Image (cartoon, rainbow, N blue to C red):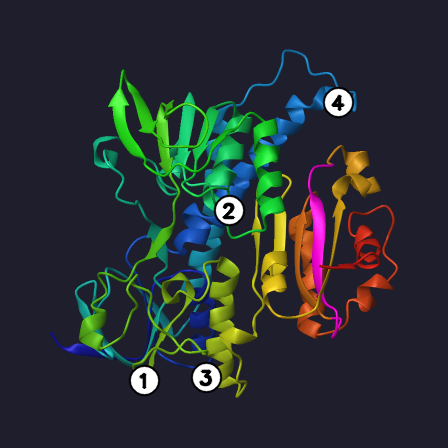
Amino acid sequence: MAAERFDAVVIGTGQAAPALCARLDREGLKTALIERKLVGGTCVNNGCIPTKTLVASARAARFAQRAGEYGVALQGGVAVDMKAVKARKDAVVRQSTDGLGKWIAGMKNVTLIHGHARFVAAHEVEAGGRRLQAEKVFVNVGARAFSPPIPGLDGVPTLDNVSMMEIDALPEHLVIIGGSYIGLEFAQMYRRFGAGVTVVERAPRLIAREDEDVSQEIRAILEREGVEVRTGAECMEVKRAAGRIVVGLSCQGGAPIAEGTHLLMAVGRRPNTDDLGLEKAGVQADERGFIKVDDQCRSNVDGVWALGDCNGRGAFTHTSYNDYEIVAANLFDNDPRRISDRIQTYALFVDPPLGRAGMTEAEAKKSGKRVLAGKMPMSRVGRAREAGETQGFMKIAVDADSQLLLGAAILGLNGDEIVHSLLDLMYARKPYTTIQRAVHIHPTVTELIPTLLGNLKPV
């Protein structure tokens, strides 16, 4: 098979790839873009966009259920039409994928090839019955759901974040193994749709990477809505009994089993690198399959980059897109941007959401810095009281000597948006007094941030 010459080959169409292809196209580089399944990757097809669309439907259901609290009477109660919920989700996804397809099709120097890409050499790839050569190869293949070796798991039907997108009927009782970000979003969502929900987590608490008070409050928020939470489930086993799925547990408290009609696995993700032929290219990966990269997304092989989830340097859509920005800046703009320049930030899209930036309070305490910290409940926020949304709190940690922000957790109404004002200040490397002395609009949630910053204490 004769090899076709390209200037660049991009493997995978996740969040980084389309923008990268647009830049390669603008630079006049003949580029092959390879996708083996769905254009757009996880975020567009079965991640951020569809799940947040479902979260919005679940929030609407929750508001309808709480209508009486606001003086609104609904005749006949609240009913959720899961077929309509799915149809709305599909329409939003289709709008995104159609737009993405048109964008790629409009790139005059980019050829989209459908097929499974595999390296046959460092700068040579096979896909769709074609062999492609290029001096520059960019890998953006993402990650997929991972299932741990739980006894009996192979003998029962399971769901993951992808197959959950195809459900158009309400499970009677959904058991979720995994008490972290994906699992908790689905837990609250399906409880609001009307399903019974049990979350089973091996660790002693939910989302253990967060501060303990954040974990405790998120658990309380879910339990107030009727989600059952079982933590410390060390010795799990799964079986079918009387037409139901039974998860055997070894927990400190509660019944020794959790049972339901459906089982969702949400315990983590693994990179889609095991069938890329990395060894033929000489590209190094770690023991979990993540491609090893330097601070500018370069692998150990000259001319081969890895972007997004598959490089293990960030597990979010926004970090994947930032990988593209870093690669483009270094290749074309003489701008030495680095992965290590970015500040960790993300959100948990339960309701109310958690917005996070920088260190946790526990990490700040371990940093060796003199730390000032403050915490304030959302019940202090007039806008939250007016909206009937007073769950959660705000907390911020500051370096006492430099007065720079170290980290923040905003768990409450609009917390996923509010945290950006603090994140921007961290990037600007300005003292926290910049926001403390700012005049914010009343009544808003953000107006409490200056008040909180004026009440910091040593920790």
Q: Classify the position of the C terminus by image quarter.
A: bottom right
| Disc number lying in front (4 or 2) | 2
Q: Secondary structure at mark 2?
A: loop
The residue where tag 4 is placed is: 69
Tell me the amino acid under the disc marked 3: Leu
Question: As drawn, which residue projects farthest toward the top?
Answer: 76
Which numbered disc covers residue 331?
A: 3
| Mark whose residue sits in front, 3 or 2 | 2
Among the two numbered marks 1 and 3 on one chain, the one whose residue lies closer to the N terminus: 1
Image quarter of residue 130: bottom left
Q: Is residue 340 above or below residue 222?
A: below
Q: Vertically, is 364 above or below 91?
A: below
**Contact, CB < 8 Å: mark 1 with mark 3?**
no
Disc 4 to disc 2: CB gap under 8 Å: no
Q: Residue at the location (77% across, 24% down)?
A: 70
Q: Nearer the viewer, mark 1 or mark 3?
A: 1
Which numbered disc, 1 or 2, marks the residue closer to the eye? 2
Q: Around disc 4, counting alpha carbons within 10 Å, would you say few (fewer than 14), some (14 to 19), or many (20 or more)?
A: few
Name the mark on residue 207.
2
Q: Which mark is residue 302?
A: 1
Residue type at mark 4 is Glu
Question: What are the residue bounds of the magenta stretch?
Answer: 390-403
Closer to the chain start, of discs 4 and 2, is 4
First along the sequence among labels 1 and 4: 4
Horizontal side, residue 384 vs residue 119: left or right: right
The kind of secondary structure element at disc 3 is helix
Q: What amino acid does circle 1 point to?
A: Asp
Q: Residue at x 30, y 68 (%)?
A: 286
Q: Residue furthest left?
A: 1
First reached walking from the N terminus: tag 3 or tag 4? 4
